[in-house]
Image: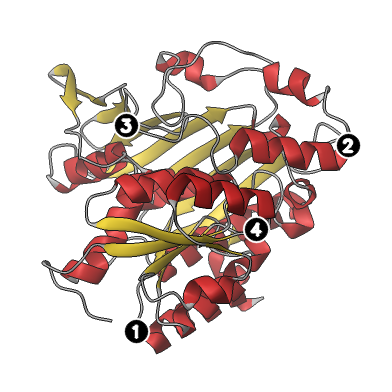
Amino acid sequence: MTHHANARPLGGGIIGLGLAGGIMAPIIAEHPGLTLAGAAETDASTRATFTADTGLPAYAEVCELLANPTVDFVYVATPHQCHRAHAVLAAEHGKHIIVEKPMALSLADCDAMIDAANANGVQLVIGHTHSFDPAIAAIRALIDSGRTGAPVSLAMWNFTDFLYRPRRPEELDSARGGGILYNQLPHQLDVARLIVNSPIRSVRAATTRLDPTRPTEGGCSAFVDFENGACATVVYSGYDRFDSDELHGWIAEGGQLKTARHGHARRMLSKIAGPEGEAAQRRVQFGYGAAGAHGNPPHQPHFGLMLVSCERADIRQSADGLYIYDDAGADEQPIIRSSWRPGRGDVLEELRRAVVDGVPPLHDGTFGRGTVEAAIAIAQSAAARREITITELAAA
């Protein structure tokens, strides 16, 4: 499938209108150079709402969406265990693919997705993770400019209410990729890998399961060692106590303003009856049509706190740009806004540039596989209580 700069906008189809798919629908529609073409979704009421809102078809079966000739690419936003099947199917129908993180839950599944994209000549982008955020691209560009020297260590820290947001059963089952290791750590791992720009050599990690009613990993502390000698300390907690956005001016992950609500998600969850009620509340609160998905946020997106220490400077995000600390003092560099939604819109732009302009995607299947590899190593390190090298993972 060949496109040229003057071609019609690329048509996007969404597979799964839950949390990620619901958020992405208006972002695709608002993005210059793209148009929303349809969706596939198992829930009939969500399909009806989507069609009523957009005038576009919503199919019960993925193959029906893939047969639609106005669909040039799909955004795969189904549960983790479905990513491989849906990505391979899309590739076989000649559709370009964006896959929500994590790419998959095994390296074999990642390899099958990469092979299918290559065999069918389609682009494969792995998103969304916060490594698409404009601030991360700005940090990488600043390092590449030579001003700061090479990165030597990253301190990454995020405390949220993740575990107490309404969930489907598999999201609380570690064996099916539930908990934070495949849902939240990929953001931090992707960001660290993009900034350091070196393969991971090894990890040493500890994880926590503090609530028997949410029997999956809710916290993690990991030391990530890169082949070039840089390192990252990665800390995540989703137990809805401290909120690290308190230290970022009460700006939420997506760039919106927020207020202190310590323990709120936990208290709300206690009022929901059973797994069915929780899954229904998840659709209402986070699925297609939920509030807050439209328009540009007032500030830049971020994922907790991060301090990048380089040979000649330290860097961290501000509300709207970067703070750079060097021998001359502290300096703030603003980030120029694009016309699309920062972060998630940049995922779409990376695919558009790959398809229309022939620019190889940064977050391709191989990059996505590396993040899955790191998450698997972290899970194994925590279980074994020892350092796990990537080479021993590959040999297993």
Q: Earlier in the sequence, mark 1 or mark 2?
A: 1
Separation (CA) of disc 1 from disc 3: 33 Å
Q: Secondary structure at mark 1?
A: loop
Mark 1: few/some/many CA within 10 Å (<14, 14-19, 20+): some
The amino acid marked with disc number 3 is: Asn
Asked whether the residues under the numbered discs 3 and 2 touch, taking CB atoms below 8 Å apart as contact, a structural biologist would say: no
- Element on which disc 2 rests: helix
Q: CA distance from mark 1 to mark 2?
A: 45 Å
Q: Residue at x 75, y 21 (%)?
A: 268
| Mark 4 / mark 3, whichever is N-terminal | 4
Mark on residue 317?
Answer: none
Name which of mark 4 and mark 1 comes first in the sequence.
4
Residue 79 tag number: 4
Task: Say what amino acid the circle numbered 4 marks.
Answer: Pro
Residue reaching furthest to the top: 260
| Vertical comparison of 216 with 364: above or below | above
Residue under label 3, please give it. Answer: 296
Q: Is residue 296 above or below residue 126?
A: above
Q: Nearer the viewer, residue 298 or 263?
A: 298
Q: Mark 2 highlights which residue?
A: 274
Task: Pinpoint residue 242: horizontal percent, then vertical percent.
Answer: 62, 17
Q: Amino acid at mark 2?
A: Gly
Residue 290 visible? The answer is yes
